[in-house]
Image: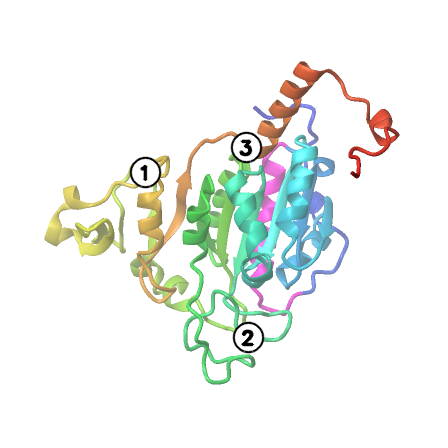
Amino acid sequence: MTDLAVPVTTRKDWASDQEVRWCPGCGDYSILSAVQLLLPELGIRRENTVFVSGIGCAARFPYYMNTYGMHSIHGRAPAIATGLAVSRPDLDVWVVTGDGDSLSIGGNHLVHALRRNVNLTILMFNNQIYGLTKGQYSPTSEVGKITKSTPFGSLDAPFNPVSLALGAEATFVARTHDLDRKHMVETFRRAHDHRGASFVEVYQNCNVFNDGAFEAINGKENRADMLIPLEHGQPIRFGADGEHGVASDGHGGLRLVEVADVGEDALVIHDERQVNPSLAFALSRLATGPHEPTPIGVFRAVERPDYGSLVDQQLLEAQNRQGVGDLASLLRSGATWNYD
């Protein structure tokens, strides 16, 4: 229920006075707009909202929000945000990061924030390239990608961010893209409303160093046949007339089918609330890259106690057992061990 004491705001109230400086045509602009349009609808206060970022093009995000924020260090945004979220559970803490920032130097911090179920809303902008440093390959670049750092083509198998998040037991995992503002707004809304670690991969076009990376699936003429919408409790089907679908392959995986050939009863029913992440993981593996029919929407949304609540509970139990500690006495108590 919305707090009636929270003042009514508009997008303008959430936008800072800083000039937005990304390359003209960058997908980051549309993501920023989606977030600024959503926030007035959430019934939250600007002074209780924090955006934490690392390094990269996406990391400029806090400058453009009229909230508290921190442009932190490369890859460490989840770690810094964890400390804030645990110590200040009254705050709405968002992490804005890129595929390079979060999956390369920051991979360890991201995985542990997800597995701990820290109450964070994590938006990962995935453009499959390092944009700020001028076009090197990233952890999500496809095999064979020719860049300044891989002139003969990348040999690295790329991360699948959704699969990674599911493997880390994130309790909310979703995917959206920068050409559908309505889908972004609703996906971000659900991520924010989820208690625990929310991870949203956003396909984001870098029109300077990796233009058109997602055109095969999110171009207007391609979306109907290439984006597979995930709707909880509904058969998974897509196409202009719902003529395509997703069915079990009989071996624990999924396959694409024509509904007319197999019948609707053969289609998989999407269950985002399934505690076992097997279905969500299989969906995340349905496409090998953004050139095949690709699921989009919420893969998983399950309930599990968030890390901050568990920490508070543990501290309360310790206090009830041992009484209130005296930090000053502890600091002045002398050595805590003896040398023989």
Q: Decide if residue 161 is in sight here.
A: yes
Q: In this view, does 57 lie above or below 199?
A: below
- Label 2: which secondary element: loop
Residue matched to label 3: 306
Mark 3, other Cα within 10 Å: few <14 / some 14–19 / many ≥20: some
Residue bearing mark 2: 209
Q: Position of residue 292 (x, y in %)?
A: 32, 64
Q: Mark 2: few, some, or many residues within 10 Å (few <14, many ≥20)?
A: some
Which mark's residue is nearer the viewer, 3 or 2?
Answer: 3
The answer to if 32 sits in the magenta stretch is: yes
- On screen, 139 above or below 181? below
Q: What stretch is highlighted in magenta?
A: 22-43
Query: Which one is in front, 43 or 282?
Result: 282
Between the residue at mark 1 and the residue at mark 2, the CA separation in whole angstroms equals 37 Å
Which residue has dot 1 on it?
A: 271
Figure quadrant of the N terminus = top right
CB atoms of marks 1 and 2 within 8 Å? no
Query: Residue 286 location, x and y as percent?
Result: 30, 56
Q: What residue type is labelled 1?
A: Asp
Q: Residue at x 46, y 85 (%)?
A: 152
Mark 1 / mark 3, whichever is N-terminal? 1
What kind of residue is marked 3? Answer: Asp
Closest to the observer, 295 or 164: 164
